[in-house]
């Protein structure tokens, strides 16, 4: 048995994404709170691929900001096609003799297991190139797989260049391909821009290798959904739905109740502890951590910097940002909590507002353990409510008028009852 070849990855992400109609590079458009290309970075990370080259073009400086350390970047100045893009990565892989896997930055739905299978198939068959293909009911827009009379893959034809017969083919090119490195580098030199778009197509390498008698393999993906490429805002939303349901399923497997996944929106990377229940119409953005046995929602909006300790309850129409709530604290109905540090066992009454912004600066509110904030209280920051202190319904605690531990404050502006 010969040694399994080493694998290197080339990720193509130079395109502007014309069809997004956006000034933001396509791969930076977010899905569940993170740029779509990050899901591709996760893939190469999970496959433990060490040599990675990312091809950038449109607004490359912007994209570079989110590229992890282990990935080299190259620049494709003029976007003259996928083969040209791969060519730009070749110098970085000079002398590399293993397998090169090609991934696209706008293909965030692929799963590790699928790529494992593809790489294994490529190595087992000793092919020059192995394509990941998919059968789609609506193959519009994708490159179609052409097979010869022995049903071996012999080429790929792009939608724009396809004839009526070819357009009827349901088997498509997902874009993911494994190449023998040397055969890839050699065939790239032979690609010509003989197509409607006058671009250098990577897909032409397939026909070039086939015509030289090399082994060309196609492996059909078991779940065609994974092949989904994102080119338009409609596809962005469809991709979102798929990734969001994967994210929510993972929580459910980890012991978190999501009452209705169809109406729950949780960004990637949110930490949630076991036995927490998330009720419908909850929106959770980036950088939120939720402890165990909490209750969140319905209709709750948790924004960046929210920290809920264990057994916290936040109910309907509550918005929280840059704030922490310690164990057993409750804010069950209507309110805004911003830039606030709340102790444990605090009751935040219905309609409480922290007025954290004076038009210029954001200021902090501190509410100590066991405090009781009466309904409809406005806390004008910066302000501190002491341990076990109470505010009466409708009180307005003005800035720097700290309420001492155990005191009761009422009225507008709030005065301390003796
Ligand atoms: C490509 C494939 C098509 C496949 C589909 C799968 C080609 C010619 N066609 O078509 O067979 O079915 O993907 O989603 O490869 N890019 C560059 N530089 C360029 C052009 C593109 O880096 O000069 C990058 C893009 O940023 C993108 C990827 O390559 O990440 C694919 O380009 P795109 O224009 O989206 O190709 P498709 O038309 O979708
Ligand atoms: Ca695409």
Image (tube, helix red, strand yellow):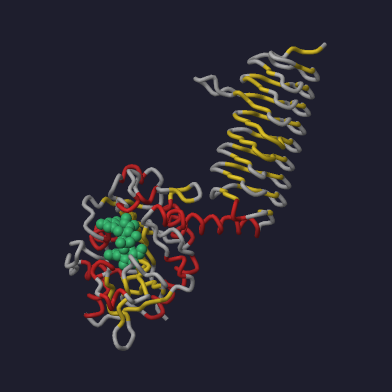
The image quadrant that residue 332 belongs to is top right
Looking at the picture, tell me which residue is in the foreground, 381 or 185. Answer: 381
The residue lying at 32 percent from left, 53 percent from top is 19
Q: Where is residue 51 in the image (x, y as percent from the top left)?
A: 37, 59
The residue lying at 30 percent from left, 50 percent from top is 16
The residue lying at 22 percent from left, 80 percent from top is 211
Count of marks placed on residues: 0
Does residue 322 appear to the left or right of 413 in the view shown?
left
Task: State the quadrant of the N terminus.
Answer: bottom left
The residue lying at 17 percent from left, 65 percent from top is 193
Above or below: residue 334 compared with residue 118: above
Q: Where is residue 153 in the image (x, y as percent from the top left)?
A: 32, 80
Looking at the picture, tell me which residue is in the foreground, 346 or 22. Answer: 22
Q: Where is residue 117 in the image (x, y as percent from the top left)?
A: 46, 73
Residue 92 visible? The answer is no
The image quadrant that residue 334 belongs to is top right
Residue 3 visible? The answer is yes
Looking at the picture, tell me which residue is in the foreground, 235 or 41. Answer: 235
Quadrant of the image where one finds ligand 2: bottom left
Q: Position of residue 291 (x, y in %)?
A: 68, 44
Does residue 388 appear to the left or right of 331 in the view shown?
right
Above or below: residue 263 compared with residue 157: above
Task: State the quadrant of the C terminus.
Answer: top right
Above or below: residue 38 compared with residue 390: below
Q: Residue furthest right?
A: 418
């Amino acid at each position: 048995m010969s040694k399994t070849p080493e694998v290197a990855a080339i990720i193509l992400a130079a395109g502007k994404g014309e069809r997004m109609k956006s000034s933001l590079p396509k791969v930076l458009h977010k899905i569940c709170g993170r740029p779509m290309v990050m899901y591709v970075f996760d893939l190469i990370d999970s496959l433990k691929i060490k040599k990675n080259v990312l091809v950038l073009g449109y607004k490359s400086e912007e994209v570079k900001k989110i590229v992890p350390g282990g990935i080299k970047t190259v620049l494709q100045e003029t976007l003259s096609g996928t083969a040209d893009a791969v060519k730009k990565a070749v110098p970085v892989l000079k002398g590399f003799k293993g397998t090169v896997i090609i991934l696209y930055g706008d293909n965030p739905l692929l799963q590790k297991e699928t790529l494992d299978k593809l790489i294994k198939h490529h190595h087992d068959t000793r092919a020059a190139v192995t394509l990941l293909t998919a059968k789609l009911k609506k193959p519009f827009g994708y490159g179609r797989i052409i097979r010869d009379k022995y049903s071996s893959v012999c080429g790929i034809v792009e939608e724009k260049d396809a004839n009526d017969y070819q357009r009827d083919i349901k088997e498509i090119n997902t874009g993911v391909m494994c190449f023998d490195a040397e055969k890839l580098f050699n065939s790239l030199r032979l690609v010509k821009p003989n197509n409607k778009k006058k671009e250098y197509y990577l897909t032409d390498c397939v026909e070039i290798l086939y015509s030289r008698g090399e082994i060309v393999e196609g492996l059909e993906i078991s779940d065609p959904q994974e092949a989904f490429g994102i080119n338009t805002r409609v596809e962005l939303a469809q991709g979102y739905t798929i990734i969001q349901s994967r994210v929510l399923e993972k929580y459910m497997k980890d012991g978190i109740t999501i009452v209705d996944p169809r109406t729950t929106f949780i960004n990637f990377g949110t930490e949630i502890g076991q036995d927490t229940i998330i009720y419908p119409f909850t929106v959770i953005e980036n950088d939120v951590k939720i402890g165990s046995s909490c209750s969140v929602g319905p209709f709750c909006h948790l924004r960046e910097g929210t920290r809920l300790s264990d057994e916290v309850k936040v109910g309907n129409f509550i918005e929280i940002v840059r704030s922490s709530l310690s164990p057993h604290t409750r804010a069950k109905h209507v309110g805004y909590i911003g830039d606030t540090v709340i102790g444990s066992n605090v009751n935040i009454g219905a309609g409480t507002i922290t007025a954290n912004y004076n038009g210029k600066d954001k200021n902090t509110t501190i509410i100590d353990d066991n405090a009781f904030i009466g309904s409809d209280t406005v806390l004008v920051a910066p302000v501190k409510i002491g341990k076990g202190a109470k505010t009466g319904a409708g009180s307005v605690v003005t800035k720097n008028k700290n309420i001492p531990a155990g005191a009761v404050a009422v009225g507008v502006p709030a005065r301390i009852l003796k």
